[in-house]
Image (cartoon, grey):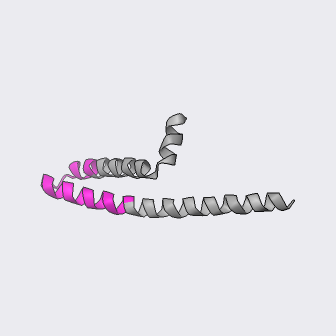
């Protein structure tokens, strides 16, 4: 459980892990392609796909973190009023 807390405290680490995972999945899927696409094309396509998906994940995660922080502040102010 400590490892998960460390990862969530460092967003760049979470994004790096996500990129590596997406790259590995993309390479595996393209490697298993029966059409026999050249290795350089597989690597380029998998890398571009992983970068785009990781960027989307990073944007969504930043938005979620900002909203979570704002929600905690509002709940704290509401609790102080009572």
- Residue 24: in sight, yes or no? yes
Residue 37, visible in the rendered structure: no
Q: Which image quadrant is residue 59 in?
A: bottom left
- Residue 9 in picture, x, y percent from top left: 51, 47
Report the residue that reaches farthest toward the right.
82
| Picture residue at 64% right of the left edge, 63% below the top | 70
Q: Position of residue 65 (x, y in %)?
A: 56, 59
Residue 20 drawn above or below residue 52: above
Q: Which quadrant of the structure image shows residue 80?
A: bottom right
Range drawn in magenta: 27-54
Which residue occupies the foreground of this view, 71 or 42? 71
Q: Is residue 39 magenta?
A: yes
Q: Is residue 30 left or right of residue 16?
A: left
* Image point (26%, 56%), residue name: 46
Left or right: 5 in relation to 71: left
Q: Quadrant of the C terminus?
A: bottom right
Q: Name the residue: 16% across, 58% down.
A: 41
Q: Quadrant of the N terminus?
A: top right
Relative to 60, 17 lies left or right: left
- The reply to whether the magenta stretch includes residue 71 is no
Give residue 44's position: percent from left, percent from top: 20, 58
Q: Main secondary structure of the magenta part?
A: helix
- How far from the left and from the top, in percent, is residue 77? 76, 62
Q: Residue at x 20, y 54 (%)?
A: 43
| Left or right of residue 54: residue 33 | left
Residue sitting nearer the eye, 35 or 81: 81
Q: Nearer the viewer, residue 45 or 52?
A: 52
**How many numbered discs, if any?**
0
């Amino acid at each position: 459980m400590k490892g998960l807390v460390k990862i969530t405290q460092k967003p760049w680490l979470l994004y790096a892990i996500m990129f590596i995972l997406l790259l590995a999945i993309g390479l595996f899927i393209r490697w298993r392609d029966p059409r026999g696409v050249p290795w350089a094309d597989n690597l380029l396509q998998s890398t571009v796909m992983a970068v785009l998906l990781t960027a989307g994940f990073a944007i969504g995660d930043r938005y979620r973190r900002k909203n979570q922080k704002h929600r905690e502040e509002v709940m704290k102010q509401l609790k102080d009023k009572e």
